Image (cartoon, rainbow, N blue to C red):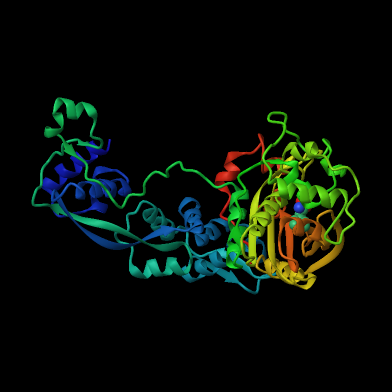
Amino acid sequence: MADELAASVLKYLSENEPIDTQDLAKVLNVDHQKIVGVVKSLQSLGEIINAEQRLNKSYELTEEGKQVAEKGSHEALIFHAIPDGGIPQAELMKTVPNAKIGFSKAMQAGWVQMDKKSEGGPKVFKKVDKIEDSVQDCMRRIQDLNLDGITDNQKNEYKKRKLVQEVKFASYLLSKGADFKLSIAKQEVDLTPEMISKGSWKDKTFKEYNFNALGVMPHCGHLHPLMKVRAEYRQIFLEMGFTEMPTNNFIESSFWNFDVLFQPQQHPARDAHDTFFISDPASAHTFPMDYLERVKKVHSVGGYGSQGYKYDWSIDEAKKNILRTHTTAVTSRMLYKVAQQPEFKPVKYFSIDRVFRNENLDNTHLAEFHQIEGVVADYGLTLGDLIGVINEFFKKLGITKLRFKPAYNPYTEPSMEVFSYHEGLKKWVEIGNSGIFRPEMLLPMGLPEGVNAIAWGLSLERPTMIKYKIDNIRELIGSKVNLQMVYDNPVCRLDK
Ligand code: PHE
């Protein structure tokens, strides 16, 4: 018990002061570190003791030194390996480990002699009958921390022979303090409700608060890797002067998700195989009707220089509620809003949020995932602007080798898939999709003639899985996620 030890320390100190904690440890036969612990806690109680720190040098045995303490010095082992009739030197050298050093030390000590002219090579004989292994003796004393009588010369030699090494440690010279006492009251650590209600706290002494002690790590929330990576992408967009769009509606009408994007109603993506339809409420009812009429017209008969798709556009199809299949639904709502402003001003928007697709699940695909999307609208934007802004965006992520491949989206023309060279996989991998929004989308919204909108999108999961080296998406999202993974993963720093 620490309290008992404290009492013994105080009792001894009352009769023998000053005393060094090292000596005290020997007298009380306890580990020096334990005495130091008691000193620290006595110090925290005020002036009970004075403790003056001293830095000490000591020695401890190396592995080789421990061997010597146990089995004898190298020179003693050599001596004992020599039979009475002597032994050829070559043979002697094979008998014990460290024979070379042992032999030379034994020669130096005058314990052995050599006959160089002997037949069959030099032969070694004992020169004395008995030896005293003072090296082993010293090693044993050092092991017992009893260094008295070991000279500095000896210490230096053992250090050179790498049998011992110097260690530094602190001890304390103890003396009685101004408030010295022999016993210390048990210190309370907590103030309990009982102490307060019974008033017993008045007679207790409380342990002083140690503001330097490390506290218990609080259990707090941890950002999921996806959210960490999202924060980094958001930062990049903000640095580039983009504004975040409101993305808080997972449920969207087909109108905003598909129709306004000039995606025909027979398009396979609008099939239940690809899209989750909402059963309750199954349809949306409020639309800007004049806009809806223009959308209907551009699909069914064309306009704005377009032939349209020439089919019977159905409002019922447009009303169908779905889980949004892409964040471009958010973009379309936003661009419509921009078009309603009295005067058009250039805009740069981004969004990062969840989308849903009724897809086959595998190691890299889930039915819900996150999209990152950027859009810029201004007069006279070109494909060159799109390539430029995408280059700039990915450059900020540390991705510089980009290639663009023509692609098809119902709402962009031209459209391009974005590929980057993956140094690890040594091949070009698709990292995003992009394009210039079609006039059939922008003009019905009411955006002025000559205003173009360039946009690109990518998934959030893919860069996250690469960044955190997760190869199965189920380890990232869903019921199988190990929360420890979430706690342990470091903050995201994209190698920009
Ligand atoms: N909406 C597209 C997708 O889901 C991405 C995209 C965004 C394409 C913007 C072009 C323009 O893949």
Q: Position of residue 27 (x, y in %)?
A: 23, 46
Q: Nearer the viewer, residue 40 or 234?
A: 234
Quarter location, residue 360: top right
Lateral position of residue 100 relative to residue 63, left or right: right
82 lies above or below 32: below
Q: Is residue 85 visible?
A: no
The quarter of the picture where the C terminus appears is bottom right
Decide which of 233, 149 is in the foreground and name it: 233
Residue 86, position as x, y percentages in the image: 60, 61
The structure residue drawn at horizontal position 47% and vertical position 62%, both measured from the top left corner, is: 163
Q: In the rendering, at what x and y percent does residue 139 appear?
A: 41, 57
Q: 474 above or below 447?
A: above
* Residue pictured at 78% horizontal, 73% vertical: 384
Task: In the rendered view, tell whether residue 160 sits above or below residue 424.
Answer: below
Image quadrant holding the N terminus, namely top left
Count the numbered circles shown: 0
> Closest to the observer: 320 or 449?
449
Regarding residue 389, the answer to whether it shows in the image is: yes
Which residue is nearer to you in this view: 330 or 296?
296
Find the residue positioned furthest to the left. 178
Q: Position of residue 280 (x, y in %)?
A: 69, 28
**Ligand 1 falls in which quarter?**
bottom right
Is 34 left, or right, of 267 in this rendering? left
Left/right of residue 315 with respect to residue 104 in the rendered view: right
Q: Relative to residue 214, is residue 395 depicted above or below?
A: below
Quadrant housing residue 350: bottom right
